Image: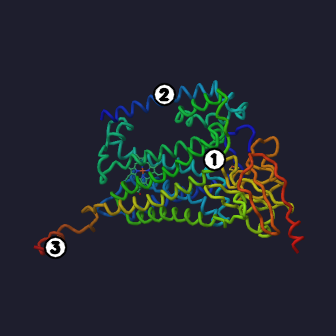
Amino acid sequence: MSVTLKPVIWYRSKLVYDGVVLLAMFLYIIAYLRLAPNLQLVSRPIDDAILRMRAFGSCAFLLVSFILAIGPLSRLDRRFLPLLYNRRHFGVIACSVACAHVYYVYSWYLNLSPLNPLLALFSANTSYGQVLGFPFEIFGVLALVILLALAFTSHDFWLSFLTPRLWKSLHMLIYLAYGAIVAHIALGSFQGSGDPFFVMIVCASALGLVGVHLAARSVSRAPEGTAGDDNWVDAGLISTIADKRARIIDLGEGEKVAIFRYDGKLSALTNLCAHQNGPLGEGRIIDGCVTCPWHGFQYRPEDGCAPAPFTEKVATYRLRRDLDRLWLDRRANPPGTRVEPLPVNEGVADGG
Amino acid sequence: MVVSQAIVSFLYAYGAAGLVAALLFLLLGIDRVEPSARGAYAFRPLIVPGLVMLWPLVLWRWWQIVQGRGADMSVRRSFLARHAAAWKTLAVVLPIMLVAALALRQSGPYELPAVPIDQRAMSVESGR
Ligand code: HEM
Ligand code: FES
């Protein structure tokens, strides 16, 4: 949460994180270049440039798959949460690896032609009307353009300049990019080399990724129920919310509310952080403020306002109770509206 | 070839326009448009590639902010729903793509194990 923009904010944990990712990447590339020649067929020797191209291409694919898996994995198991903090650096690294892949593609496939490389790319194969021999490169281009756009706009400047809404829409393109990468591999590498080991890895990553996302969705769905008034929903038992933590209530249609328990009180805020829609309800109360798990933006639980000098605000919600059972008004208050916190002990003591 | 040539010329023109737009924005726009950029210079080179790539979007936002509009910083509640929709789509599209690609695959003669030539000649003869 910086007041003036800085080039890159690196602190210790981020340095360690980037270091581990880069190390893993280098080990993968080295292992690939060492091991792959042993697996090749005698009848089809692979030359160095192709080997590098494949090493970086498959590395980029695995990195993007892993990045997309971090979100649902941390929802399923909180131990993955630290990985979430630094996804942006991870994305930039994946994009650079993809660029290295394209560099080696050029140094081999397209260097054989005297044409301008860009021109060669679009004119080498134009059989768009067929599946076999389809110019799969075009899917790679699409994916690379998207990865570049996301990496280029990863600085906080873009978030505030484009507005979180537009920025988030832009970054939703990662799903299109992932589909394009899989198409690029399925129509390209699968048709050509068809290395069964690589085919298996690609299929397992893509299907596994879909699997964890579907599994995470079912986990975050909370029980619903309505009292006489349709606007009030059952939000579960107060006694089962941990201190300084939240329960997340899914109101349907993508709307989620985080109900925090702190200092013997309860307050409800939208689950969406005003910074990058981080899941506030997965954060905790630090120094009396709800603290987003992604980049640490803070909000006062009673009114959803960031403490001065910051100006972010999020929507608040009204709470009611019936002994230990909590009820939530599904109509959101405008961001920054103060709502009197609900004391935890009152009703429980009365009810014996 | 004509089409490819046209695409490439377009890309060059787009990039050149992007450079001009980026320069204008950094010189004239950024301090007015983005209060937190005032007095901060080190981050500016980092945003140049994005300015060049997305210049139509940049000019549009710049114009919007100068007009005093589009200050809507609120977050759309439907993002989670869109994530879910994106994953449901991928859950259908990815398996179809992978299965289709593997089903359509033609195994060429190069996928057979290598056999010494004289032996192959023998097996061909014995097959007759
Ligand atoms: C300008 C963009 C791109 C071009 C021109 C391009 C071109 C190619 C070519 C020619 C191949 C060889 C296919 C074969 O061996 O039969 C290939 C393979 C591959 N590409 Fe790309 N690509 C591009 C972008 C990307 C991106 C962005 C990714 C992933 C993030 C990617 C991932 C891969 C993978 C995983 C392979 C298969 C490697 C293997 O067979 O082991 N490519 N690409
Ligand atoms: S999403 Fe960045 S701090 Fe909440």
**At 80% across and 53% down in the image, what residue appears?**
A301
Camera-nearest label, 1 or 2: 1
- Callout 1 secondary element: loop
**At 52% across and 47% down in the image, what residue appears?**
A173
Give whichever of discs 1 and 2 has the lower sequence position: 2
Tag 1 residue? B76
Camera-nearest label, 3 or 1: 1
Q: Position of residue A265 (x, y in %)?
A: 85, 60
- Callout 3 secondary element: helix
Tag 3 residue? B123
In the image, residue A198 above or below residue A1: below
Three-letter amino acid code at the position of disc 1: Arg
Three-letter amino acid code at the position of disc 3: Ser
Tag 2 residue? B16
Judge from the rendering whether residue A282 lies leftward or rightward of residue A322; answer left or right.
left
Mark 2 — on which chain does it sit?
B
Query: For the residues tagged 1 and 2, is the chain the same?
Result: yes
**Can the viewer see residue A235?**
yes
**At 64% across and 36% down in the image, what residue appears?**
A161
Distance in Å between CA atoms under marks 3 and 1: 70 Å
Distance in Å between CA atoms under marks 1 and 2: 35 Å
**Can the viewer see residue A15?**
no
Give whichever of discs 3 and 2 has the lower sequence position: 2
Query: For the residues tagged 3 and 1, is the chain the same?
Result: yes
User: Where is residue B128, by image quadrant?
Assistant: bottom left
- Callout 2 secondary element: helix
Give whichever of discs 3 and 1 has the lower sequence position: 1
Mark 3 — on which chain does it sit?
B
The reply to whether the C-beta atoms of the residues labelled 3 and 2 are less than 8 Å apart is: no
